[in-house]
Image (cartoon, helix red, strand yellow):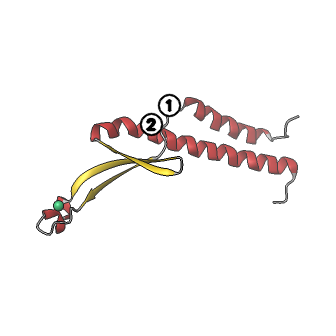
Amino acid sequence: MSAEVPPEVDAQRRRIVAELGQLGFTLPGSIVTRTVTCGRATCGCASDPEQRHGPYIQWSRTVKGRTVSKMLTVEQLETYQPWIDNGRRLRELAHQLETLSLEAMRTAEGWNS
Ligand SMILES: [Zn+2]
């Protein structure tokens, strides 16, 4: 037996699942690009933001509860970024599907909370 779900709610589920079905490769984590100062008072970076070192491109993800980071080149960034964007979309869609399902079951079952 399956929960009674209104057609419009099932249509939303279909939209989410259809987009999931189109998704390419997915990487976890996120990318941060930053420039840094080196700490030497005589270096240009100390006073001029334009002379800060970098950019340093860092991909970070969580592995067994620990943050693991990898430095990327600009070329690698172009390769990794689409997969990382897909990973973010995967998590968004999974969250949407779960939220929709919770609402559907709440309605079908008449939960109070
Ligand atoms: Zn410097």
Judged from this view, the residue extending furthest toward the left is 42
Q: How far apart are marks 2 and 1 (CA)?
A: 7 Å
Foreground of the two, 41 or 102: 41
Amino acid type, mark 2: Trp
Amino acid type, mark 1: Gly
Looking at the picture, how far across and down is residue 88, in whole percent? Answer: 51, 44
Q: How crowded is mark 2: few (under 14 residues within 10 Å), some or many (20 or more)?
A: some
Vertical side of 41 occupied by 54: above or below: above
Quadrant including the C terminus: bottom right
77 left or right of 109 in image: left
Name which residue lies at 53% across and 51% down.
65
Tag 2–tag 1 contact (CB < 8 Å)? yes
Looking at the picture, how far across and down is residue 40, in whole percent? Answer: 16, 66
Looking at the picture, how far across and down is residue 89, in whole percent? Answer: 53, 42
Check disc 1 and report the residue beneath it: 24
Looking at the picture, how far across and down is residue 16, in whole percent? Answer: 63, 38
Foreground of the two, 83 or 41: 41
